[in-house]
Structure formats: structure tokens, C-alpha cells
Image (cartoon, helix red, strand yellow):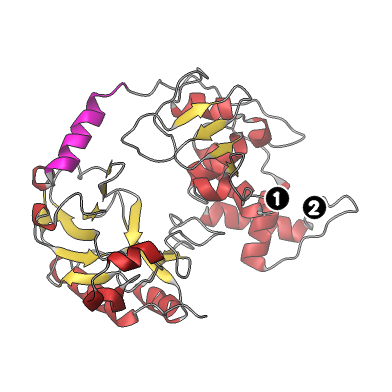
Amino acid sequence: MSLPMPRVDEFIRFIKLLGQSAPDLVPWLIRLNPAGKDPIEGVSWKDPTYGRLTIYQAIDYMKHGGNIGIAGTDHDNLVMTDCDGGIIKENEVKPTLNVRTRSRIGLHAYSINIDTPKIPNIPTDEAGEVRSIWQFVVAPGSYVPVSTAKLELIPEADKENAGYYTINNPIAPTTLTYSELPNFFRETHERKKEAPKRLPSTFNPKTVNREHSALFDITAEDVCRKEGGDTDTSTRWGSIFHDSDTDANMSLSNEGLLQCWRHSCSFNGLQALVVLSGYMDCNQAGSPHEGVAGSSGMIGDNGAIFHAWKYAYEHGYLPKGDRIPTKALVYIAEKEFHYKAQKNSKGEYLMLPTNVYREVLRVLKEKY
């Protein structure tokens, strides 16, 4: 049985409304999986070259069945108030362009920030989130199935829209300040500001190893120290991967693995760096806890190696002159030049031909 297609006309209508009060806003649009809310695998949605879509590319992707996400960034004025589950009532949200979510209960409100600094991201456990800086929501017109239980709660007159994100208040986005946010979000943020801060970084870069990249020497404890987590295995602390209101959804295990209790998965150093790079999320890169189905999506993905190395190199985990992993070079060769890398009898990649290697280095310098 085929799933309903996204509603392209609804997306176009939304984009036109969005531009009425923010003509200079170039929205950060990204590909989400068909009938899903997660970014497609294989490319970081934060990548301005390969992860970001133009409006026309987004429309074409929807015509082929894909969903679209829209993000706020640190260089635009878009703020999205994501109110889930009916905890925050619609009359508590300042009137603006807003969208009814797939359950027909939740609400996404799109506003134009006029505060300095920009209104921050504010997560909550049950009431939704304020998504402002490098966070996204599902764009109108997209379709994500709802469970049978939730479908039964939707009024009969609205069942035709079940699973769809549809415009609820078709007006241009209005301005928003922090003081105009619903009380629940502001109270949550104020409590979080008063909570103990993460420990400062105590990590020093690895030393150069001419045989292989020091990327593979980075442990989960190294990541914990560098990002400001707590290395005491008896305590839980706020996640380094995603904001949380609980400040207790991550820990370091006795086996030296990072544990994300929000998503029930574990991470070694390499897996943690892949998540921090934005190339994969917790569920994709992590190893599920015992009793949870699945395996790490990193297996066999050379892009994960490249993006982990790039993040580690740019954020001080690796020394200058660190040797970029062969799999990372192969990823760029395949992505940019459609080059099919060869392997030896052990399944290990052979060195790239000199001309391919030089082209890969050129692309790395120019694009990455």
C-alpha cells in the first residue's frame, strides 16, 4: 500500500507567506526521509553545499515523495515555536503564521526574531521546543503517518489531514521577542540557566601518528572531556548531542562508552564525533542498548568517517598535520568524481591513484 504524497501546493503557499514579512530570508530547507521526520542519511543537513536546498529543489524533492524540513540558523531571524501535545494552548502563542502538525494537536509557529542576541533554543520534555539556532521542524505539506491510537483522537472532519503538516493561520510571520514567548518556555529556560554548568574541557589534542589518523585513537572519554561532560561514571548530566530540560540524559559507562538515555544507545569516540558533526543523529550513529533492535548506521559508511574527521580536526581533537583517513579520501573521491575505489583481498582500500588523490586534496581545500 502506497503512502499519501506530500502536498506541494501547501508548501508553496507556506513559502509565499513566509516571505511576505521576511523578503530577505532565504530559508534553510533540508531533505527529510519520505514519510519521516529525520534528515536523509549520507549528508549532513548543515552542509551548505549538499545539505541545503533551494526552494525549487525542495519542491522537486516533494514531487518525488520526500518530506522537507526548515531550520533556523545563527545568521537568520527565523524562530519556530514547536508546541506539542496540547500542553501549551494556541491562545498562549503570539498570533503569527502557524502550522497544524500531523497529530492535528501540535502547532508550529513561525516568527521573526527582533531580540539581540537571538531567542535561544529552548527544549522541554513534553511541551515542545523553541527552535531557533541550527534546529529544524517539518515543513508544511509534508506527510508522516500517525498511529491508529492517535488517528482515533482526530475529529472526523479533520481526518483527511491526519499525518499532514498544514497551514493553520495563513498570515505573514509577526515579530517575536523572548518576553513574548509562552510562559512555560521562559520558565523552563530560566531554570536551565540556573542549573550547574557542564565541566570545562580538560582535553588535549592527540599526538601526530604517521601510520594512521589520530581520529581512531579518540575515546568516548576524550569526547566527554573535550565537550564538557562528566567523566564520573556514577553521575548523569546534560547531553552533549542535544539540548534537554532534564540535565540527566547522558553518562559515561564503566566500559568507557557514552550513553544517551534519551535515545537508549551507546557511543565510542568515533560514533560520538559523527553525531557532533551533524552527519548522523543519535539513533543513526549509536549502538542500541541491549533489548533495542538495530545497529549503528555508521557501519560501511565512509561519509561518517570523513565528517567525524572533519569535526575532530576543526574542533581541536586532532593535531595539525594529522593524516586524513583513507576511507574519508575514498568518500570524497566517490562523491565528487564517482570514482570506484579498489580493495585488497582483506577488504581494505588500496591507495588512491596519484591523479585522483591530488584532485581529492584540491576539492577538500576548496569546498571543505
Q: Residues within 10 Å of mark 2 (few under 14, many from 20)?
A: some
Distance from Cα at disc 1 to Cα at disc 2: 7 Å
Residue drawn 12% across the image and 62% down it: 96
Q: Position of residue 100 (x, y in %)?
A: 23, 66
Q: Amino acid at mark 2?
A: Tyr
Q: Which residue is mark 2?
A: 349
Q: Position of residue 265 (x, y in %)?
A: 55, 40
Q: Nearer the viewer, residue 312 or 247?
A: 247
Where 220 sits versus 155, above or below?
above
Residue drawn 57% across the image and 47% down it: 285
Where 1 sits versus 115, above or below?
below
Asked whether the beta carbons under mark 1 and mark 2 sit within 8 Å of each other, the answer is yes
Q: Residues within 10 Å of mark 1 (few under 14, many from 20)?
A: many
Q: Nearer the viewer, residue 71 or 87?
A: 87
Q: Is residue 107 visible?
A: yes
Q: Which residues are magenta?
A: 183-196
Q: Position of residue 289 (x, y in %)?
A: 58, 39
Mark toward the start of the polypeptide (1 vs 2): 1
